[in-house]
Image: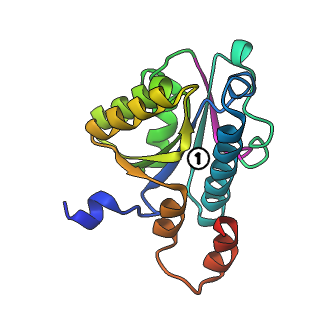
Amino acid sequence: MSLKDRFLLDRKQTVLAMLDVQERLSAVMDAGEMRQLTRNVNILLETAKELGVPVVVTEHYPKGLGPTLLELAPQAASASHIVKLEFNACDNAEFVAALCATGRRQVVVVGMEAHVCVAQTVIGLRDAGYEVYVVRDAILSRTVRNWKLACEVTTLAGAIPTSTEAVVFQLLRVSGTPEFKKLVKLVK
């Protein structure tokens, strides 16, 4: 596998996994960090929609943690939605089936909590042979210490650390297209 194949996203091989960005869970996060996560996830959802990248959304125990964050629900409306109890989404047959149905091997991961469901799912995805890209400015934990731990663990597991802007520009690949002109406005 070449470096390009390992480190750069290919929109025809990419799926976006949004893990557990839910109302009651977001309420216990730092408000400023939560605003930034919401902005970045919205950018990635809009990018996915524009470029035809499938999206899989999980909700962990929505009875207790509430539904997907209201500000993200419209952008995620056409995504596959999976309700789960498992921290590692890869232990949920419906999540695995939704991923497999896309036929794609690169998974961009965003969500909460970084050190719990995100980290465990990233490990599960890597164990299943997926190339995984963790969007560090679109994952969140209640504490910075736990967020840093998640970043370290997911990288050690073989996931590629990335950012919202890096994902957008890797999926675009070239400037000057109508897609570029539309999406570049989101990251300015």
The answer to whether one can see residue 104 in this image is: yes
Identify the magenta region.
76-84
Q: Is residue 153 above or below residue 56?
A: above
- Residue drawn at the location 51% of the way across and 31% of the way down: 144
Q: Is residue 144 above or below residue 162?
A: above
The residue identified by callout 1 is 55
- Residue drawn at the location 61% of the way across and 55% of the way down: 44
Q: Quadrant of residue 73?
A: top right
- Residue 97 screen position, x and y as percent: 48, 33
- Residue 3 screen position, x and y as percent: 23, 64
Name the amino acid type tagged 1. Answer: Val
Count residues near mark 1 (Cα–Cα under 10 Å), then give few for <14, some for 14-19, many for 20+. Answer: many
Please check the rendered image and state whether residue 158 is part of the magenta-colored stretch, yes or no.
no
Q: Residue furthest bottom?
A: 176
Please check the rendered image and state whether residue 77 is part of the magenta-colored stretch, yes or no.
yes
Is residue 40 or residue 144 the one in the foreground? 144
Is residue 61 or residue 144 the one in the foreground? 144
